[in-house]
Image: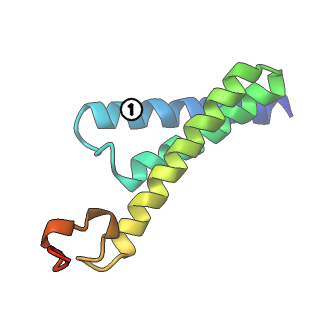
Amino acid sequence: MPVVVTALGWIGAVTCLTAYVLVTQGRWSPTSGRYQLANVLSGLMLGTVAASSGVWPSVVTNLVWAAVALHAGLVLLRRRTRPAGLDASRVDVAHSGSAGI
């Protein structure tokens, strides 16, 4: 079991650092799905490793990291699947035809 946990730790660390380097170099966008997926996976892996060692501040940090990335990824996915022009959060009330009512 310790070998599996160690492997998860290294894979999670390399995934997180690789994603960060690719965003820093401009090769990935910070709003790309692959960047968010890398953050979800690395956060879960590193959180699992921390939990197996009882390092609870790191567990919480990595789980929150993964949750934020998951939320961002879902928002990106929703934007991709929504037809153009139907973004209700960006409706301009002044130009929606209801002015003067």
Give the residue at x 59% y 44%.
Answer: 67
Q: Where, by quadrant of the figure, is residue 57 drawn?
A: top right
Residue 42 place in picture, x, y as percent = 57, 38
Along the horizontal axis of the image, is 13 left or right of 100? right
Can you say whether 83 is above or below 26 in the image? below
Q: How many marks?
A: 1
Along the horizontal axis of the image, is 48 left or right of 22? right
Can you say whether 5 is above or below 98 in the image? above
Can see residue 47? Answer: yes
Residue that extends furthest to the right in the rendered view of this protein: 1
Can see residue 11? Answer: no
* Residue in the foreground of this view, choosing between 21 and 68: 68
Can you say whether 32 is above or below 89 in the image? above
Give the residue at x 15% y 74%.
Answer: 99
* Residue in the foreground of this view, choosing between 38 and 30: 30
- For badge 1, the amino acid type reads Tyr
Q: Where, by quadrant of the figure, is residue 98 drawn?
A: bottom left
Element at label 1: helix
Give the residue at x 51% y 52%.
Answer: 71
Q: Quadrant of the C terminus?
A: bottom left
Along the horizontal axis of the image, is 3 left or right of 61? right
Mark 1 nearby-residue class (10 Å; few <14, some 14–19, many ≥20): some
Q: Where, by quadrant of the figure, is residue 77 drawn?
A: bottom left
Can you say whether 74 is above or below 18 in the image? below
Q: Which residue is mark 1?
A: 20
Along the horizontal axis of the image, is 7 left or right of 76? right
